[in-house]
Amino acid sequence: MLKINVKQFGVVLFAIASVLAVGGSNTSKLHAKSRGCTNAALKGGYGAGTTGLINSSSNPSDVTIPTFVPFAEAASFSFDGAGNLSGTSTADYGGSSFPVVFTGTYSVNSNCTGSMTVDAGVNGIIHRDLVLVDGGKEVEFVDTDPGFVIAGSMKKQQAEE
């Protein structure tokens, strides 16, 4: 017959309960940290490249090939992690390049999609839908304004310190 020492049994039960409690709390912390995205997923500097076409017609119903003008841009974005952004770019519209300074806001959903609204001064207000990749190290985007066929991507410039 197996003889159980009550004192030893109590120590073993306490040890098992302690391991489960510590392991369970670590697991829930890791699990909570890895689920979903927030505005904080975009923080710091990003480099972006954008290409596409912009409808140059004053008639929004005129969507023929001759009305679209090529567009390209290299941009530097700075996100604050709380929904605000700023940056600069060099844009090329139909072969003429010019500098752009901008500010704006952004919102990231828990499924790692989002949107941003950029005020580019005399160049207008720009709206883009976003998809964050690899925890926000990369961002794919597409312009959602009528007459714009523009898409691009951003990459994190440096790790947070």
Image: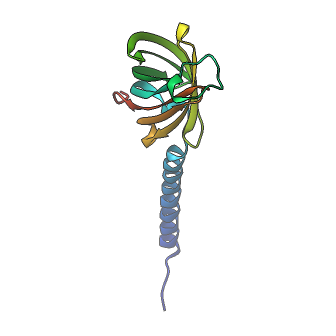
Q: In the image as oriented, which residue stretches furthest toward the bottom?
A: 1
> Where is residue 59 drawn, in percent x and y?
64, 19
Q: Is residue 112 above or below residue 16?
A: above
> Where is residue 114 drawn, in percent x and y?
57, 34
Report the front residue among 135 and 115: 115
Q: Residue at x 51, y 44 (%)?
A: 33
Report the front residue among 19 and 97: 97
> Where is residue 146 drawn, in percent x and y?
62, 26
Q: In the image as oriented, which residue stretches furthest toward the left?
A: 158
Q: Is residue 108 left or right of residue 11?
A: right
Q: Quadrant of residue 126?
A: top right
Q: Is residue 141 above or below residue 27?
A: above
Q: Is residue 107 visible?
A: no
Q: Residue at x 48, y 30 (%)?
A: 42
Of the 4 image quadrants, the one containing the C terminus is top left
Q: Is residue 140 above or below residue 158?
A: below
Report the front residue among 15 and 135: 135
Q: Residue at x 50, y 72 (%)?
A: 9
